[in-house]
Image (spheres, rainbow, N blue to C red):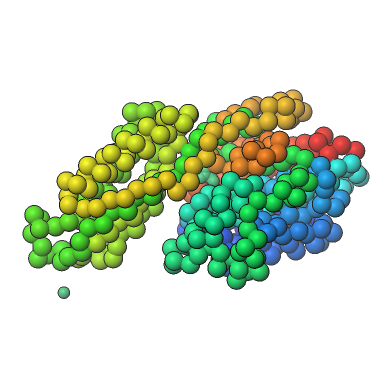
Amino acid sequence: MTFEQMWAELEPIGRGPDGGYRRFAWTGPELECRAWFLAQAAARGLDVEPDANGNLFAWWGGPGPDAVVTGSHLDSVPGGGAYDGPLGVVSALAAIDLLRERGVRPARPIGVAAFAEEEGARFGVACLGSRLLTGAIDPDRARGLRDAEGRRFGEVVAGHGLDPLALGRDDALLGRIGCFVELHVEQGRALDAPVGVAASIVPHGRWRFDFTGRGDHAGTTLLEDRCDPALPFAHTVLAARAAAERHGGVATVGRAEIVPGGVNAIPSAVTAWLDARGPAEPVVRSIVEDVGRAADRAATEHGVAVEWAEESYSAAVEFDAGLRDRLARLLDAQVLPTAAGHDAGVLAARVPTAMLFVRNPTGISHSPAEHADLADCLAGVAALAAVLEELAGT
Ligand code: HGY
Ligand code: MN
Ligand code: MN
Ligand code: MN
């Protein structure tokens, strides 16, 4: 099956009427994508190995040791694009097909991975599958993470055949991975060629703000009698923008829940999530401190209680310099940093890791408008095949 045929099969899964995807981990569309991946692996005679953390691995040449692993994720943000994640998985399968067509017999095993809950769109922590695999999150904490319906991660994965007590760092599996290369659509406006090589990922994280006020009637409650949590929430959103400008980073409040959500009801509570990133950790920390102070001040001013805390933090990642330079030379490719997080950034703490980026002509991502031209996707497949051949040896 060609890249185009695989893409055509995967593309409709979880796509909404506006073209945006909703493939949350362990929900119908994402499970359908997983089933699709397993069927593709089986059709190629790859050895499928689901790990204990919900990540899927498919092996060409048996599962290790010293394997070259590639892949990405199949879940999406709410209203996401088609390419963020699936491009890396489909390209991995297509690259294996290309190598086989050319009669390449790799000396080292090649693995294709599909990591679970990369976006953290359901349980809040990004790269949850790869964090569990590498030990970057305490399994106890992961088990207790709740989705928007209040269901715990541990219970949800138990319903899909995983043992919640077996979640966590898997040194045996990691020990079989010699290196990891993730192909991903570029998510900014920095790549001016079909394919590039990643240099680094900026530090970034997520913080949760809980404002608690007093619900009341929107008509009969005088302004001076209100404890309206939407007011400090609004201050906090504006403070995030101002702090990002002041410190030279970026900050976003992309998700908020206003409770109970009645037009004619003063809210009783607001929960909001801040995403902050910057070129260096002090920038990110300064942004968050300023936003936290602004939230505290505005809450006091409006008679509202506020609690805020870090949900997850990813330190700056420099990809393996030897691997990065080798790939850039092999592909004669531009080397560029990114402000987007990836499973590769998590894996980098444990195994030599690199990333390939495929050009994004508009730079738009986490949106239905995210796009990559077919010619660039095919160039990505060819580049990945060349990289796998080079790294796996023949
Ligand atoms: O949020 C991010 O940076 C991502 O694309 N996972
Ligand atoms: Mn993403
Ligand atoms: Mn991604
Ligand atoms: Mn009434």
Name the foreground residue: 169 vs 265.
169
The x, y position of residue 108, in whole percent, is 86, 42
Q: Is residue 165 left or right of residue 121?
A: right
Q: Quadrant of residue 55?
A: bottom right
14, above or below 133, in the image: below
Q: Is residue 210 left or right of residue 176?
A: left
Which residue sits at x=37%, y=32%?
Answer: 286
Q: Which quadrant, please, contains the N terminus?
A: bottom right
Q: Quadrant of residue 161?
A: bottom right
Name the foreground residue: 215 vs 71.
215
Q: Is residue 82 left or right of residue 217?
A: right
Which residue sits at x=56%, y=67%?
Answer: 156
The x, y position of residue 209, in whole percent, is 34, 50
43, above or below 310, in the image: below
187, above or below 311, in the image: above
Name the foreground residue: 76 vs 133.
133
Which residue sits at x=27%, y=59%?
Answer: 269
Which residue sits at x=28%, y=39%?
Answer: 293
Q: Quadrant of residue 177?
A: top right
Q: Which quadrant, please, contains the C terminus?
A: top right
